[in-house]
């Protein structure tokens, strides 16, 4: 960083005139001392009778850049939780996010945010000397529609190992919890998941199922806590 700092000493008492001696790299004798880098400096002040006192000055680099951002995206669904971050600085710094509404921990550099409406959050970081830096971010809220086509279950797939449409997934950006069950025509459960990222590869107990029609039961809880339920058929094509 550029060494552009200044430090002053303002003595009182004793017998003027005063003289100054700084312990910087240039051993400056002026008041103020100039072109200082961030760091700790000692100054000795003497009066006309050669009486002296020393003091310490700490300079902080105010050019520190703090980058605040929402994790992954600044657009979320109503009821969704996202992490918002500010840069974790080394040293004795305190953080404060405002407004605190929807925040898990407003005094942490990183916190979970669950706003119910579009909100601009401000974060202020302060050091032990009272210097502060401030930045902001906005989380834009999208309304959740807990229904099709925002929840989609394909009605067929082709698990033949060609790398195309080999795994059946539920497709949804509004789902918070999922319960997905698939049964064969005799009513035996062949697949179950509570994770959208887990798809069915068309096997049961490690063996490929025969081509045919399977029945599914789906229950999804959306981010806005609404419930979507559906039963339907899935055709396995080989």
Image: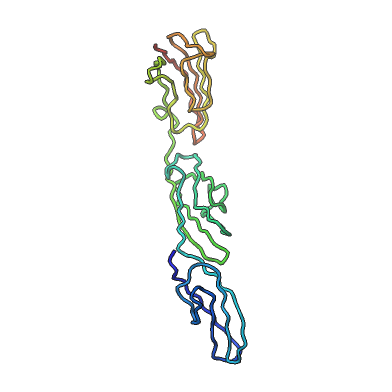
In the picture, which quadrant includes the N terminus? bottom left
Q: Is residue 162 left or right of residue 31?
A: left
Where 57 sits versus 195, above or below?
below
Nearer the observer, 37 or 59: 37
Expressed as whole percent of the image width and height from the top left, the position of residue 191 reads 52, 17
The spot of residue 70 in percent (x, y) is 46, 47
Q: Quadrant of residue 127?
A: bottom right
Vertical arrangement, residue 29 with respect to residue 175, above or below: below
- Picture residue at 57% right of the left edge, 75% below the top: 42
**Residue 149, x across and y down, in percent:** 39, 28
Q: Is residue 51 above or below residue 129?
A: below
Which residue sits at x=53%, y=20%? 192
Q: How many marks?
A: 0
What residue lies at 56% left-to-right and 67% top-to-bottom? 129
How far from the left and from the top, in percent, is residue 130? Answer: 55, 66
- The residue at the point 48 percent across, 55 percent down is 122
């Amino acid at each position: 960083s550029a060494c552009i700092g200044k430090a002053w000493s303002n003595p009182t008492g004793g017998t003027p005139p005063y003289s100054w001696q700084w312990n910087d790299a240039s051993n400056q004798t002026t008041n103020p001392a100039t072109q200082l880098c961030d760091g700790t400096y000692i100054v000795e002040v003497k009066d006309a009778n050669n009486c002296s006192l020393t003091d310490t000055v700490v300079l902080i680099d105010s050019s520190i850049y703090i980058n605040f951002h929402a994790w992954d995206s600044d657009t979320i669904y109503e009821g969704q939780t996202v992490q918002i971050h500010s840069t974790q600085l080394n040293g004795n710094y305190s953080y404060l996010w405002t407004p605190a509404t929807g925040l898990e921990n407003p005094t942490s550099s990183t916190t979970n945010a669950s706003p119910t409406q579009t909100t601009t959050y401000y974060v202020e970081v302060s050091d032990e000397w009272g210097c502060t830096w401030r930045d902001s971010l906005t989380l834009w809220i999208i309304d959740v529609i807990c229904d099709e086509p925002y929840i989609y279950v394909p009605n067929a797939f082709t698990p033949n190992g060609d790398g195309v449409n080999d795994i059946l997934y539920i497709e949804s950006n509004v789902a918070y919890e999922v319960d997905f069950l698939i049964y064969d025509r005799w009513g035996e459960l062949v697949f179950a998941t509570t994770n959208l990222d887990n798809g069915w590869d068309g096997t049961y107990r490690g063996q490929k199922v025969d081509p045919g029609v399977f029945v599914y039961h789906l229950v999804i809880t959306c981010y806005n806590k609404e419930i979507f339920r559906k039963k339907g058929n899935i055709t396995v094509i080989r």
